[in-house]
């Protein structure tokens, strides 16, 4: 029985408005998947972009070097190819080109078959006043829950 790996990008929901979600596979080498299985990865500052051939890559995703790797170890900040259907890739590329949206990773996990997957989202950046609104709503909910707990 393997432990569950669930690495999240917590800042993404605060900084972006999520419009659409997809689950993509990642092309990894042997030492990269071993590091991910040890929870030695981060997607906090990462984003996704297309190359000139229409392939989607995740940029700035950190997968730390495998501790027991030899000189064949991977680079920690390498760009990694994402695997999606051709139809999904065309739709995402059109949305990014036309409307100025961005693609951000939300969650890195390992599925039942033992394969690394990345939940990505088509997102629109929030303005400063939207972020303030989010903070205010979170504080109001916290205060309301506190009051409900007192009167139970």
Image (spheres, grey):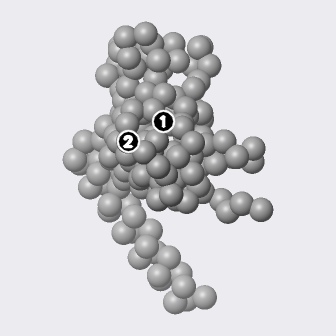
Query: Pointer 2: residues within 10 angstroms few (<14), some, or many (20+)?
Result: few
Instruction: Please report the residue visible at 43 percent of the width from the left and 10 percent of the height from the top.
Output: 53
Query: Pointer 1: residues within 10 angstroms few (<14), some, or many (20+)?
Result: many
Q: Position of residue 51 (x, y in %)?
A: 38, 17
Work out which residue is located at the far left of the displayed protein and give it.
Answer: 128
Mark 1 highlights which residue? 121
Q: Position of residue 11 (x, y in %)?
A: 37, 53
Q: Secondary structure at mark 1?
A: strand
Left or right: where does residue 107 sit relative to residue 127? right
Name the foreground residue: 127 vs 32. 32
Name the foreground residue: 38 vs 23. 38
> Can residue 84 be spotted in the picture?
yes
Work out which residue is located at the far front of the displayed protein and give it.
Answer: 71
Count of number-bearing discs: 2
Quarter of the image for residue 101 reads top left
Left or right: where does residue 37 sit relative to residue 19? right
Alpha-carbon span between mark 1 and mark 2: 25 Å
Instruction: Please report the residue visible at 39 percent of the width from the left and 32 percent of the height from the top.
Output: 79
């Amino acid at each position: 029985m393997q432990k569950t790996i669930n690495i999240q990008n917590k800042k993404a929901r605060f900084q972006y408005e999520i419009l659409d979600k997809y689950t993509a596979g990642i092309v990894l080498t042997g030492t990269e998947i071993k590091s991910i299985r040890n929870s030695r990865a981060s997607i906090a500052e990462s984003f996704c972009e297309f190359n000139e051939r229409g392939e989607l890559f995740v940029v700035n995703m950190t997968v730390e070097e495998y501790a027991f790797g030899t000189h064949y170890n991977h680079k920690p900040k390498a760009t990694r190819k994402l695997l999606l259907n051709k139809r999904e890739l065309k739709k995402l590329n059109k949305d990014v080109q036309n409307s100025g949206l961005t693609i951000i990773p939300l969650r890195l996990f390992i599925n039942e078959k033992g394969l690394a997957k990345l939940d990505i989202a088509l997102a629109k950046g929030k303005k400063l006043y939207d972020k303030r609104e989010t903070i205010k709503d979170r504080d109001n909910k916290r205060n309301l829950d506190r009051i409900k707990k007192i009167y139970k």
